[in-house]
Image (tube, rainbow, N blue to C red):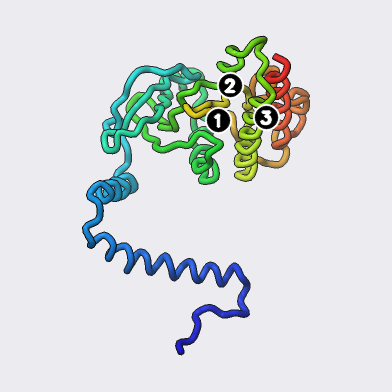
Amino acid sequence: MGRSLVNPGAPAQSQFDLIEALLVDYCEKVALPLWLNKGTNPKLLEYLRYLKIQHEVPPTEKTFNVFRTMGKGGFGLVKGCRTFTTGRMYAMKEMDMKHVKQKKCKTLCDQEHWALSIPLVCDSPFCVNMKYAFKTEAALCLVIDLMMGGDLSFHLDKAEGRKMPENFVRYYSARVVLGLEVMHEAKIVYRDLKPENVLVDGDGRTRLSDLGLAVPLAPGLKGIAGTPGYLAPEMLQHKPYDQSVDWWSFGCMIYEMVNG
Protein backbone atom coordinates (compact mmCIF):
# COMPACT_ATOMS: atom_id res chain seq x y z
CA MET A 1 0.00 0.00 0.00
CA GLY A 2 1.16 3.53 -0.72
CA ARG A 3 2.27 5.86 2.01
CA SER A 4 -0.21 8.61 2.99
CA LEU A 5 0.79 12.17 2.04
CA VAL A 6 -1.00 13.50 5.11
CA ASN A 7 0.76 13.32 8.45
CA PRO A 8 -1.89 12.24 11.01
CA GLY A 9 0.06 14.03 13.71
CA ALA A 10 -0.05 17.40 11.94
CA PRO A 11 -2.53 20.10 13.02
CA ALA A 12 -5.98 19.69 11.47
CA GLN A 13 -5.70 22.95 9.49
CA SER A 14 -2.36 21.87 7.98
CA GLN A 15 -3.89 18.55 6.91
CA PHE A 16 -6.83 20.35 5.34
CA ASP A 17 -4.58 22.85 3.52
CA LEU A 18 -2.51 20.04 2.00
CA ILE A 19 -5.58 18.12 0.82
CA GLU A 20 -7.10 21.29 -0.63
CA ALA A 21 -3.89 22.13 -2.53
CA LEU A 22 -3.71 18.60 -3.98
CA LEU A 23 -7.37 18.69 -5.08
CA VAL A 24 -7.03 22.11 -6.71
CA ASP A 25 -3.88 21.00 -8.54
CA TYR A 26 -5.60 17.82 -9.78
CA CYS A 27 -8.71 19.71 -10.94
CA GLU A 28 -6.69 22.33 -12.83
CA LYS A 29 -4.23 19.95 -14.51
CA VAL A 30 -6.29 16.79 -15.02
CA ALA A 31 -10.03 16.95 -14.38
CA LEU A 32 -10.86 20.29 -16.03
CA PRO A 33 -8.98 19.64 -19.32
CA LEU A 34 -10.60 16.18 -19.60
CA TRP A 35 -14.04 17.61 -18.92
CA LEU A 36 -13.65 20.45 -21.42
CA ASN A 37 -12.68 17.96 -24.15
CA LYS A 38 -15.92 15.95 -23.78
CA GLY A 39 -18.21 18.19 -25.83
CA THR A 40 -19.04 20.67 -23.08
CA ASN A 41 -22.02 22.98 -23.57
CA PRO A 42 -20.90 25.75 -25.99
CA LYS A 43 -22.55 28.43 -23.86
CA LEU A 44 -20.52 27.32 -20.86
CA LEU A 45 -17.31 27.44 -22.90
CA GLU A 46 -18.25 30.92 -24.08
CA TYR A 47 -18.78 31.99 -20.46
CA LEU A 48 -15.44 30.51 -19.38
CA ARG A 49 -13.72 32.40 -22.20
CA TYR A 50 -15.47 35.57 -21.04
CA LEU A 51 -14.17 35.05 -17.49
CA LYS A 52 -10.65 34.64 -18.87
CA ILE A 53 -10.97 37.84 -20.91
CA GLN A 54 -12.46 39.69 -17.95
CA HIS A 55 -9.34 39.00 -15.92
CA GLU A 56 -6.90 39.71 -18.73
CA VAL A 57 -8.42 42.73 -20.51
CA PRO A 58 -8.93 45.94 -18.47
CA PRO A 59 -12.44 47.42 -18.88
CA THR A 60 -12.96 50.73 -20.67
CA GLU A 61 -15.98 52.86 -21.51
CA LYS A 62 -16.32 50.76 -24.69
CA THR A 63 -16.98 47.69 -22.52
CA PHE A 64 -20.43 49.04 -21.64
CA ASN A 65 -23.62 50.19 -23.28
CA VAL A 66 -24.71 53.11 -21.08
CA PHE A 67 -28.42 53.88 -20.61
CA ARG A 68 -30.42 56.53 -18.81
CA THR A 69 -29.30 58.50 -15.78
CA MET A 70 -30.63 56.91 -12.59
CA GLY A 71 -29.52 59.48 -10.07
CA LYS A 72 -27.08 62.20 -9.17
CA GLY A 73 -24.30 61.85 -6.62
CA GLY A 74 -22.03 64.37 -4.97
CA PHE A 75 -19.47 64.20 -7.78
CA GLY A 76 -21.41 63.15 -10.86
CA LEU A 77 -24.12 60.96 -12.31
CA VAL A 78 -25.18 57.37 -11.68
CA LYS A 79 -26.27 55.61 -14.88
CA GLY A 80 -27.60 52.22 -15.80
CA CYS A 81 -25.30 50.20 -18.06
CA ARG A 82 -24.94 46.79 -19.65
CA THR A 83 -21.82 44.89 -20.65
CA PHE A 84 -21.60 44.09 -24.34
CA THR A 85 -20.06 40.67 -23.62
CA THR A 86 -22.69 39.21 -21.26
CA GLY A 87 -25.58 41.67 -21.33
CA ARG A 88 -25.52 41.91 -17.54
CA MET A 89 -26.88 45.12 -16.04
CA TYR A 90 -24.97 47.31 -13.56
CA ALA A 91 -24.94 50.84 -12.21
CA MET A 92 -22.10 53.09 -13.34
CA LYS A 93 -21.04 55.80 -10.90
CA GLU A 94 -19.27 58.53 -12.86
CA MET A 95 -17.14 60.88 -10.76
CA ASP A 96 -16.52 64.00 -12.85
CA MET A 97 -12.83 64.78 -12.29
CA LYS A 98 -13.27 68.49 -13.07
CA HIS A 99 -16.00 68.70 -10.44
CA VAL A 100 -13.92 66.66 -8.00
CA LYS A 101 -10.92 68.98 -8.41
CA GLN A 102 -13.10 72.08 -7.97
CA LYS A 103 -14.42 70.70 -4.68
CA LYS A 104 -10.96 69.40 -3.73
CA CYS A 105 -12.51 66.02 -2.98
CA LYS A 106 -10.24 63.59 -4.83
CA THR A 107 -9.45 61.96 -1.49
CA LEU A 108 -13.11 60.96 -1.09
CA CYS A 109 -13.13 59.32 -4.52
CA ASP A 110 -9.91 57.47 -3.74
CA GLN A 111 -11.31 56.35 -0.37
CA GLU A 112 -14.43 54.88 -1.96
CA HIS A 113 -12.35 53.05 -4.57
CA TRP A 114 -10.04 51.76 -1.81
CA ALA A 115 -12.91 50.54 0.40
CA LEU A 116 -14.79 48.86 -2.45
CA SER A 117 -11.59 47.08 -3.55
CA ILE A 118 -11.12 45.28 -0.23
CA PRO A 119 -11.99 41.58 -0.82
CA LEU A 120 -14.16 41.30 2.30
CA VAL A 121 -16.28 44.19 1.05
CA CYS A 122 -16.35 43.54 -2.70
CA ASP A 123 -17.44 39.91 -2.14
CA SER A 124 -20.04 40.62 0.55
CA PRO A 125 -23.79 40.21 -0.10
CA PHE A 126 -24.40 42.99 2.44
CA CYS A 127 -22.33 45.72 0.78
CA VAL A 128 -22.57 47.11 -2.74
CA ASN A 129 -19.96 45.24 -4.80
CA MET A 130 -17.65 46.96 -7.26
CA LYS A 131 -17.42 44.87 -10.43
CA TYR A 132 -15.20 47.12 -12.55
CA ALA A 133 -13.31 50.41 -12.27
CA PHE A 134 -11.72 52.50 -15.00
CA LYS A 135 -10.86 56.08 -15.95
CA THR A 136 -11.86 58.16 -18.94
CA GLU A 137 -10.46 61.55 -19.86
CA ALA A 138 -13.24 63.19 -17.86
CA ALA A 139 -14.24 60.81 -15.08
CA LEU A 140 -13.41 58.00 -12.69
CA CYS A 141 -16.04 55.30 -13.25
CA LEU A 142 -17.03 52.69 -10.68
CA VAL A 143 -19.30 49.93 -11.97
CA ILE A 144 -21.31 48.47 -9.09
CA ASP A 145 -24.33 46.29 -8.37
CA LEU A 146 -27.58 47.57 -9.85
CA MET A 147 -30.07 48.11 -7.00
CA MET A 148 -33.53 48.61 -8.49
CA GLY A 149 -35.48 49.00 -5.24
CA GLY A 150 -34.39 52.51 -4.26
CA ASP A 151 -33.03 53.23 -0.78
CA LEU A 152 -34.42 53.00 2.75
CA SER A 153 -35.19 56.72 2.80
CA PHE A 154 -37.47 56.23 -0.22
CA HIS A 155 -39.30 53.40 1.55
CA LEU A 156 -39.58 55.43 4.76
CA ASP A 157 -41.19 58.26 2.80
CA LYS A 158 -43.74 55.80 1.43
CA ALA A 159 -44.59 54.41 4.89
CA GLU A 160 -47.43 55.97 6.86
CA GLY A 161 -45.97 58.58 9.21
CA ARG A 162 -42.51 57.48 7.99
CA LYS A 163 -42.81 54.54 10.40
CA MET A 164 -41.97 51.04 9.22
CA PRO A 165 -43.69 47.86 10.45
CA GLU A 166 -41.68 46.08 13.13
CA ASN A 167 -40.94 43.04 10.94
CA PHE A 168 -39.50 45.33 8.25
CA VAL A 169 -37.33 47.10 10.82
CA ARG A 170 -36.00 43.78 12.13
CA TYR A 171 -35.19 42.51 8.64
CA TYR A 172 -33.49 45.66 7.38
CA SER A 173 -31.62 46.12 10.67
CA ALA A 174 -30.27 42.57 10.54
CA ARG A 175 -28.85 43.08 7.05
CA VAL A 176 -27.32 46.44 8.02
CA VAL A 177 -25.67 44.80 11.05
CA LEU A 178 -24.15 42.14 8.80
CA GLY A 179 -22.89 44.83 6.43
CA LEU A 180 -21.30 46.79 9.27
CA GLU A 181 -19.68 43.64 10.61
CA VAL A 182 -18.09 43.04 7.20
CA MET A 183 -16.66 46.57 7.13
CA HIS A 184 -15.46 46.36 10.71
CA GLU A 185 -13.79 43.01 10.07
CA ALA A 186 -11.99 44.74 7.18
CA LYS A 187 -10.78 47.41 9.68
CA ILE A 188 -12.99 50.11 8.11
CA VAL A 189 -14.85 52.91 9.88
CA TYR A 190 -17.87 53.57 7.63
CA ARG A 191 -18.88 57.00 9.06
CA ASP A 192 -21.89 57.57 6.80
CA LEU A 193 -24.63 55.14 7.78
CA LYS A 194 -28.08 56.60 7.08
CA PRO A 195 -31.23 55.41 5.25
CA GLU A 196 -30.14 57.06 1.98
CA ASN A 197 -27.03 54.86 1.92
CA VAL A 198 -28.88 51.58 2.44
CA LEU A 199 -29.86 50.46 -1.06
CA VAL A 200 -32.56 47.89 -1.81
CA ASP A 201 -32.54 45.46 -4.73
CA GLY A 202 -35.54 44.15 -6.66
CA ASP A 203 -36.04 41.31 -4.16
CA GLY A 204 -35.97 43.54 -1.07
CA ARG A 205 -32.41 42.71 -0.01
CA THR A 206 -30.32 45.62 1.21
CA ARG A 207 -26.66 46.56 0.77
CA LEU A 208 -24.61 49.37 2.27
CA SER A 209 -23.34 51.89 -0.27
CA ASP A 210 -21.45 55.19 -0.70
CA LEU A 211 -18.14 54.50 1.02
CA GLY A 212 -16.56 57.86 0.18
CA LEU A 213 -16.24 58.78 3.87
CA ALA A 214 -14.92 55.37 4.94
CA VAL A 215 -11.43 55.37 6.45
CA PRO A 216 -9.04 52.74 7.83
CA LEU A 217 -9.36 52.12 11.55
CA ALA A 218 -6.41 53.78 13.28
CA PRO A 219 -5.50 54.91 16.82
CA GLY A 220 -6.43 58.51 17.57
CA LEU A 221 -8.79 58.83 14.60
CA LYS A 222 -10.46 62.26 14.58
CA GLY A 223 -12.50 64.47 12.27
CA ILE A 224 -16.18 65.12 11.65
CA ALA A 225 -17.57 63.10 8.76
CA GLY A 226 -21.09 62.00 7.97
CA THR A 227 -24.57 63.50 8.10
CA PRO A 228 -26.01 65.68 10.89
CA GLY A 229 -28.47 63.69 12.95
CA TYR A 230 -26.41 60.51 12.70
CA LEU A 231 -23.10 61.74 14.15
CA ALA A 232 -21.79 60.22 17.39
CA PRO A 233 -21.13 62.54 20.39
CA GLU A 234 -17.39 61.84 20.46
CA MET A 235 -17.13 62.89 16.82
CA LEU A 236 -19.01 66.15 17.47
CA GLN A 237 -16.78 66.81 20.49
CA HIS A 238 -13.65 66.38 18.33
CA LYS A 239 -12.52 63.43 20.44
CA PRO A 240 -10.76 60.31 19.12
CA TYR A 241 -13.18 57.62 17.98
CA ASP A 242 -13.31 54.15 16.47
CA GLN A 243 -15.88 51.89 14.79
CA SER A 244 -18.36 52.49 17.61
CA VAL A 245 -19.47 55.68 15.81
CA ASP A 246 -21.08 53.44 13.19
CA TRP A 247 -23.18 51.74 15.87
CA TRP A 248 -24.37 55.14 17.08
CA SER A 249 -25.51 55.95 13.53
CA PHE A 250 -27.17 52.53 13.37
CA GLY A 251 -29.13 53.29 16.55
CA CYS A 252 -30.24 56.64 15.10
CA MET A 253 -31.42 54.89 11.95
CA ILE A 254 -33.43 52.28 13.87
CA TYR A 255 -35.06 55.05 15.92
CA GLU A 256 -36.00 56.83 12.71
CA MET A 257 -37.51 53.68 11.19
CA VAL A 258 -39.55 52.96 14.32
CA ASN A 259 -40.65 56.46 15.32
CA GLY A 260 -40.63 58.38 12.04
Type of amino acid at the residue the image marks with label 3: Arg
Residue occupying the point 56% across, 72% down: 15
Q: Which residue is mark 1?
A: 206
Q: Residue furthest bottom?
A: 1
Closer mark to the observer between disc 3 and disc 1: 3
Q: Residues within 10 Å of mark 2 (few under 14, many from 20)?
A: many
Gap between marks 3 and 1 measured at Cα: 12 Å
Q: Are marks 2 and 1 in contact (CB under 8 Å)?
A: yes
Q: Earlier in the sequence, mark 2 or mark 1?
A: 2
Q: Residues within 10 Å of mark 3 (few under 14, many from 20)?
A: few
Q: Relative to residue 207, is residue 13 depicted above or below?
A: below
Q: Secondary structure at mark 3?
A: helix
Closer mark to the observer between disc 3 and disc 2: 3
Q: Which residue is mark 3?
A: 170
Type of amino acid at the residue the image marks with label 1: Thr
Type of amino acid at the residue the image marks with label 2: Leu
Q: Relative to residue 149, is residue 217 depicted above or below?
A: below
Residue occupying the point 54% across, 45% down: 120
| Residue 40 screen position, x and y as percent | 25, 55
| Residue 255 screen position, x and y as percent | 73, 21
